[in-house]
Amino acid sequence: MYEAVLAAELEKRGLTVVRQQAMPVVYETVKLEIGFRADLVVNGKVVVEIKSVEEIAVVHKKQLLTYLKLTGKRLGLLINFNTALIKNGIVRIVNQLEE
């Protein structure tokens, strides 16, 4: 449900949104055509993972970072809809961020 609402809102703002996009995974000589499905991919650049959990856990952040690494994308958003203020439920994850 949250996925559809968010996708519709982003599309109203002129962004291209693909829901449940199948992402291939390649490891050495093994290729899986559908390694995982990204909840949303915005403008072909940003992977958005949607949750509705009590609290964002480290495993959720690592899951999104893994998705970014496997797809070669740089930016991901982890959005938890189970918060009083949505801005408190958004975590930005960057692949290959130099610290």
Image: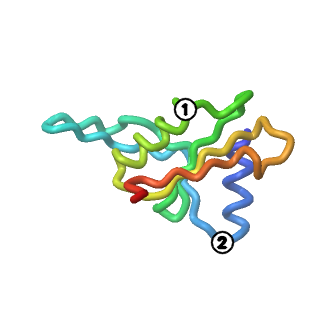
Sort mark 1 into few (<14), some (14-19) or many (20+) by Cα contacts within 10 Å.
Answer: few
The amino acid type of the residue labelled 2 equals Gly
Where's the N terminus, which quadrant? Answer: top right
Q: How many marks do you count on the picture?
A: 2
The relative height of residue 68 versus residue 53 in the rendered view (above or below) is below
The amino acid type of the residue labelled 1 equals Val
Give residue 51's quadrant in the image: top right
Q: Position of residue 10 (x, y in %)?
A: 68, 61
> Along the horizontal axis of the image, is 78 left or right of 74?
right
Q: Nearer the viewer, residue 34 or 59?
A: 59
Secondary structure beneath dot 2 equals loop
Give residue 22's quadrant in the image: top left
Q: Position of residue 46 (x, y in %)?
A: 51, 58
The relative height of residue 16 versus residue 56 in the rendered view (above or below) is below
Q: Nearer the viewer, mark 1 or mark 2?
A: 1
Where's the C terminus, which quadrant? Answer: bottom left
Q: Residue at 70% across / 31% down in the picture?
A: 55
Q: Residue at 73% across / 42% down in the picture?
A: 2
Q: Give the alpha-carbon distance from disc 1 to disc 2, as whole Å.
A: 32 Å
> Along the horizontal axis of the image, is 29 left or right of 15?
left
Instruction: Give the mark nearer the N terminus: 1 vs 2.
Output: 2
Q: Which residue is mark 1?
A: 58
Q: Residue at 34% across / 45% down in the picture?
A: 70
Q: In the orientation shown, which residue stands out farthest toward the left?
A: 29
The relative height of residue 9 versus residue 55 in the rendered view (above or below) is below
Q: Which mark is residue 46?
A: none
Q: Which residue is mark 2?
A: 14
Q: Position of residue 87 (x, y in %)?
A: 76, 52
